[in-house]
Image: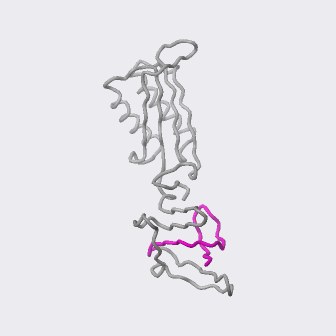
Amino acid sequence: MAYKLNCLSMTSRNVAYPNVHRPSQGKPIQRVSPFSGRTSMLSAPTLKVSQGKRKQALGLVVRAGGNTCRTDLMNLPGDPSLTVFTNVSMGDKKMDFMLKASKAVASCLGKPESYVAVCVEDGKDLIWGGKADPAALCTLYSLGAINLQNNKALSAELCTLLAEHGIPSNRYYINFFDLPRENCGYDGATFGG
């Protein structure tokens, strides 16, 4: 059978989808018969197809040729993840730094802290300008919220946090990356669906 549907990241089109699950809150799906070409509407409550091992209601799940579209992930705020590499050994103050950095990322990007991931690799071999003085290299990936205002705010927050560990403001870089939703995996799918 072919179903005509809208999947936020896809345009509406007729495609064969053998496994379709849609929760009862959704709009009806227009079914196009491959034999007669006639259309009929399937109401959401009447369309129940098993998702195999995943039995939880995840929003619209469409599988065709191995492709999956998860609309439940498409509206989530998604990944802000911060990675910090430094030649400074933070010792027992590392977790405090990570917790403060997590709050700073959430605050500066306007995202819930429940989605923020922070990884700190301290005590690494790192030189800056040919010297092994305290320095840091940072990367921040996010689905949206990467812009001049947010980047400046987070850079200022990290500058303060890194200074607490003896890293001067002129010896760290932070690179900001705005990821397309389909390029970030989570919960067995991507934020693009």
**Residue 33 colored in magenta in the image:** no
Q: Position of residue 54 (x, y in %)?
A: 42, 64
According to the image, what is the colour scheme of the structure? one colour
| Residue at figure coordinates x 57%, y 38% from the top left | 148
| Residue at figure coordinates x 53%, y 79% from the top left | 28
Q: Nearer the viewer, residue 48 or 27?
A: 48
Reply above or below: 72 against 119. below
**Residue 19 colored in magenta in the image:** yes
Magenta-colored span: 1-25
Query: Which part of the image, by quadrant, shows the N terminus?
Result: bottom right
Q: Position of residue 88 (x, y in %)?
A: 42, 20
Toward the left, the furthest residue is 92
Reply above or below: 51 against 126. below
Q: Nearer the viewer, residue 11 or 15?
A: 15
* Residue 43 relative to residue 113: left or right: right
* Residue 101 relative to residue 31: left or right: left
Q: Position of residue 127 (x, y in %)?
A: 53, 17
Query: Which quarter of the picture shows residue 163?
Result: top left
Query: Which part of the image, by quadrant, shows the C terminus?
Result: bottom right
Q: Position of residue 130 (x, y in %)?
A: 57, 12
| Residue at figure coordinates x 68%, y 87% from the top left | 36
